[in-house]
Each structure stands twice: as C-alpha cells, then as structure tokens.
C-alpha cells in the first residue's frame, strides 16, 4: 500500500473509531434504563405493600401486625409477575419473608445453571462472554457502592429499611462482585395510617445489560458497515488517484532516463479531472521537450555544417598561401582568408544570438508594446542604414496596435526584415513598412521592390542557415540566420510570419512579373 493510500485511510477511518469508542463510554442509555427500572420497581413495591396492608394483617386494631404466612403467600404470587426478589421486614426491621427461601423449611433457594437449548453455539456464546467481559472493563460515568447481601439481611441494615419504616421511600443502585448492578427500592407497608413494616424489592441489571449490549452490538454493526464502506471508498479513491499518478511518475522516469527522449505518457484526459489535466500537461510538456531536444540536435548539426565550409576554405587558402610565389596570388589568398575569418565571425555572432534568443524568450519579462509607436521611433534608424533606398512608414491611426512582448526583440524583427528588404531593393527603390489592426491581430508588413521570392524557396526561407541572396551580393556576407531569428521571436510572442510575392498585373489582368516581396507578421493584440 502506497504512503498516499495509507494517508487516505488514516484520515477517513479514525472518525468512525472515535464514534465507536465514544458510544461505549457514553452511558446515558444505561442510566435511562436504570432510572426507568427504579420507577417501575417502586410502583411494583407499592402494589405489593398495598396488597400486604390489605390482605396479610392479623391481630386487633390496637395490636395490628402482618401475618407472616399470609405475607409469604402474597410475595410468592408477586414474584411471578415482578421477577424481583422480595423481602418483608417487620416494624423492628427484622426480616419476616424472603422470596428466595422455602416457606416450610426456611432454607434458601439454590439456583444452578442448566443447559439452555436456546443458547447460541460455542463460538458465538464465547464471543458474547468475551464481549460482556470487555464491557465490564469499560469505565462508567457513575460509580456505585459495592453490594453486600449481609447488609440487606441484617436488622435495619439496609439504608432504605429505616427510611421506609419511617413512612418514606428508599432506593439505590449497587455494584455486585461480578460487575452487574443491583437495583433496590424500599416502601412502607401501611394499614390504618400506621407503618407495619417495609417491603424491599431488589433485581439485578441482567435485562438492562442485555438491552444495552443489543444496542451496542447494533450500533457497532452500523459503524462497522459504515467503516467498511469508508474503507472500500478509500481504497477506490486511492486506486483512482494513486495508480494514475504512479503511471505518470513511471512515464516521467522513462523520459528522464532516456535523456528527454520521447516516452508514452498515459492519456487520462477522459477522466475530466485534475489528474487528466496533469496527464495532458505532461504529454504536452514531453512533446515540447522532444521538439526542443530535436531542435538542439538539428541546430548543432547545422552549426557544424556551416562552420565547416568557411574552415575548409580557410584551410585551403592557408595551405595554398604557403606555396604561392607571386605577390598578386598571395594578395588574393590573403583576401580570401580575411573574408573567411569575417564570415566565421558573423556566423559565430549570429549563432550566439540565435541560441541566446531561444533561451531568453522563455524567461524574459514582457510588457505592453505599441507596435505603431515602435515603428515610428525606429524610422530614422532604419533609414540611416538603408543607403539609397527610401523607407516609408504607414501606421494606422486610432486602431489598437498594442501587444504584450519584449520591445527590443520585436525591434530586432523589424530591423532584420527591413535590412533584408533593402538588400533586395534596387538603388532608389522604396521599402514600405505598414502597421494595421485586423481581426484581433496587429499586422506588421514589410514590402520591397526587388525580384520577389522564388516559389521553391518560400517553404525554406525561414529555415536556419538558408540563404537566397541577390547575385550582386558578395558570397558569405549573410549567414542565413536573420529570418530564422525573426520566426523564433514572432512565434515566442504567439504570432506568425509569412512571405508572399507582390504580383505585377498588366492592363488586362495578366501576370507580367513580380514587383517585390512582402513579409507579414501577425501578433495577437493586447486586451485590458
């Protein structure tokens, strides 16, 4: 059993155990039964005393007394209905009649346990005996004095007899040596407004203990059933929670041991609860992790390939330089070495920038950025690096053009796109930057007047180290990372970037050629 399952059971079961224990220690029910038995015993004692005061008298009015033989007959009849032990005391407190003694011989009635055909079989009876023993050990709220048969039999020994001989009532509860309680009441026997004796009724708590035991057993059964249901529900709850979590934990361990490689994450989305959400989050996280690992490996392979080309050229030029004898050859080889070194320097700088962007976008603090204002602020900077190409800016007024992002990185996207557009534009041409609001998005577009993008290059132009440069441009002057960096930054802001050609249609709507290329960036607008 897992620690979480044990905690669930530990939390749920003690509440029932406390209730069960509290039931045994709360004896209000027993106290109520004792009080009710005392009242009924008192009524029975008054009835017997009344019968004795009417039908068991002897002597004259001046010397009126209770006849022992008549009283013994009446008490024997009364025992059949009350089930209590009846004792009759005379005016001096001496016992005259005891229902437990034979009337003719005066000997006490001996009671022996005989076989009971209705008794439960041995295992059940043994359990009942153990139950009674255990119940006797439990402390009770009330402490009762010890019961002594000698005190009852003594002359005026029991405290209730003197009170009854004075015309009052006496009652009490005692505890026997076997743990059972003894209930007793004493009432006066009166005739002609004179007290002629006292009747004492005593009965043990056997019936009360049996009733309490039945109630306790029934209540314990209810608690046991509730505890069983709680246990089963706890097991079901623990299995429905712990087993899926264990499966997710094992899948996460497999991802870790495989170095971030793909692993089957259980799909628990059909649960429609937090564990299902956790499984989907782990699945998406693993997918993203796999994609990141794959991207890192591909990036490393691309970097190795791109660095190898200038290094190979550089090595060849240096080896040839050692054998070159003519000054013009040595000068040309020196230029090649310097170009390759410059190309390596650009590659290393842009590779460092690209990897830094990849790590930075996940933890950079973002804030509202007004794209329209940013473009207007950068217009002069863009124009200063455009040479003979004019930069025009068209920003829509009154539209919401604010997004949440990193302004310096978005500015880098704008500069890369404009630099790319300027490199393809003819001398005296125009690069147009537009910012508009469209369907919940801020749309930034950069248009040039160059030859456009070849159809076969549209799908690869944003890939790392891919370069499609003008024929007049010096080889190796661009690393092919500029547009890839733009895509990284835009996608990190939840946007998209795409390229399309600007078609030149003639008078009759026929395609004549291309008037340039348009790069379009779409970013989600910021909503307060």
Image: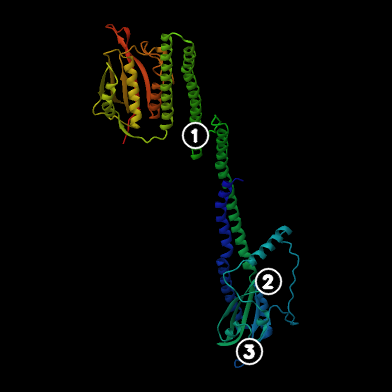
Contact, mark 2 vs mark 3 (Cβ under 8 Å): no
| Residue found 27% across the figure and 22% down from its top | 384
Residue 419, x across and y down, in percent: 33, 20
Residue 218 appears in the picture as rendered:
yes
Q: How many marks?
A: 3
| Quadrant that contains the C terminus | top left
* Cα distance in 3D space between marks 2 and 3: 32 Å
User: How much space separates mark 1 and mark 2, taking CA atoms?
Assistant: 68 Å
- Residue displayed at 68% across by 61% down: 128
The mark closer to the camera, 1 or 2, is 1
Quick check: 482 left or right of 221? Answer: left
Q: Nearer the viewer, residue 177 or 18?
A: 18
Decide: few, some or many residues near mark 3? Use Cα within 10 Å; few <14, some 14-19, many ≥20.
Answer: some
The residue nearer to you, when weighing 482 against 8, is: 482
Instruction: Report how far apart the C-alphas of labels 1 and 3 lie in the structure.
Output: 94 Å
SS label for mark 3 = loop
Residue designated by label 2: 178
The x and y percentages for residue 143 are 59, 73
Q: Which residue is mark 3?
A: 92
Residue 42 in the image, given as x and y percentages of width and height: 58, 76
Identify the residue at the far left of this view: 397
Tag 2 or tag 1, which sits nearer the N-term? Answer: 2
Above/below status of 102 relative to 498: below
Label 1: few (<14), some (14–19) or many (≥20) C-alpha neighbours in 10 Å: some
Circle 1 is placed at which residue position?
Answer: 280
Q: Position of residue 211 (x, y in %)?
A: 61, 64
Label drawn at residue 509: none
Q: Looking at the rendering, which quadrant does residue 121 occupy?
A: bottom right
Camera-nearest residue between 16 and 47: 16
Between label 2 and label 3, give the one nearer the viewer.
2
Describe residue 148's horizontal placement relative to residue 435 as left or right.
right
């Amino acid at each position: 059993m897992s620690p979480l399952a044990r905690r669930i059971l530990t939390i749920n079961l003690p509440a029932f155990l406390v209730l069960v224990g509290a039931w045994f220690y709360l004896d209000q029910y027993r106290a109520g039964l004792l009080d009710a038995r005392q009242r009924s015993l008192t009524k029975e004692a008054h009835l017997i005393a009344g019968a004795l005061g009417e039908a068991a008298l002897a002597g004259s009015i001046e010397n009126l007394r209770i006849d022992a033989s008549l009283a013994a007959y009446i008490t024997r009849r009364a025992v059949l209905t009350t089930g209590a032990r009846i004792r009759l005391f005379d005016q001096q407190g001496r016992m005259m009649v005891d229902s437990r003694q034979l009337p003719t011989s005066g000997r006490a009635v001996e009671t022996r346990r005989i076989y009971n055909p209705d008794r439960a079989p041995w295992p059940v009876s043994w359990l009942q005996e153990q139950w009674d023993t255990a119940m006797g050990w439990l402390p009770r709220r009330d402490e009762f004095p010890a019961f002594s048969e000698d005190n009852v039999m003594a002359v005026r020994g029991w405290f209730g007899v003197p009170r009854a001989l004075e015309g009052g009532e006496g009652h009490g509860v005692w505890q026997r040596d076997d743990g059972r309680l003894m209930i007793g009441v004493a009432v006066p026997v009166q005739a002609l407004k004179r007290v002629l004796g006292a009747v004492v009724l005593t009965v043990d708590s056997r019936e009360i203990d049996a009733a309490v035991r039945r109630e306790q057993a029934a209540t314990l059964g209810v608690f046991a059933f509730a505890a069983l249901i709680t246990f089963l529900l706890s097991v079901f709850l623990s299995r429905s929670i712990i087993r899926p979590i264990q499966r997710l934990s094992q899948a996460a361990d497999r991802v870790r041991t495989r170095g971030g490689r793909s692993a089957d994450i259980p799909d628990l989305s059909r649960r429609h609860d937090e564990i299902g959400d956790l499984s989907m989050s782990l699945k998406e996280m693993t997918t993203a992790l796999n994609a990141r690992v794959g991207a890192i490996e591909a990036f490393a392979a691309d970097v190795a390939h791109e660095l190898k080309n200038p290094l190979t050229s550089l090595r060849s030029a240096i080896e040839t330089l050692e054998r070159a004898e003519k000054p013009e050859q040595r000068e040309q080889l020196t230029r090649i070495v310097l170009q390759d070194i410059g190309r390596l320097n650009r590659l290393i700088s842009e590779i460092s920038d690209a990897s830094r962007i990849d790590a930075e976008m996940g933890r950079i603090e973002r804030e509202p950025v007004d794209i329209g204002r940013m473009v207007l602020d950068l217009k002069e900077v863009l124009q200063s690096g455009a040479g003979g190409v004019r930069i025009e800016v068209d920003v829509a007024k009154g539209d919401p053009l604010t997004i949440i992002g990193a302004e310096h990185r978005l500015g880098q996207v704008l500069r890369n796109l404009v630099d790319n557009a300027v490199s393809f534009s003819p001398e005296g041409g125009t690069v147009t930057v537009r910012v508009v609001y469209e369907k919940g998005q801020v749309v930034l577009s950069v248009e040039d007047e160059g030859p456009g993008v070849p159809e076969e290059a549209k799908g690869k132009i944003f890939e790392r180290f891919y370069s499609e440069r003008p024929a007049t441009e010096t080889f190796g002057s661009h690393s092919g990372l500029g547009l890839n960096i733009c895509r990284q930054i835009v996608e990190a802001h939840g946007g998209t970037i795409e390229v399309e050609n600007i078609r030149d249609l003639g008078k009759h709507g026929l395609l004549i050629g291309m008037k340039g290329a348009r790069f379009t960036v779409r970013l989600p607008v910021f909503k307060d």
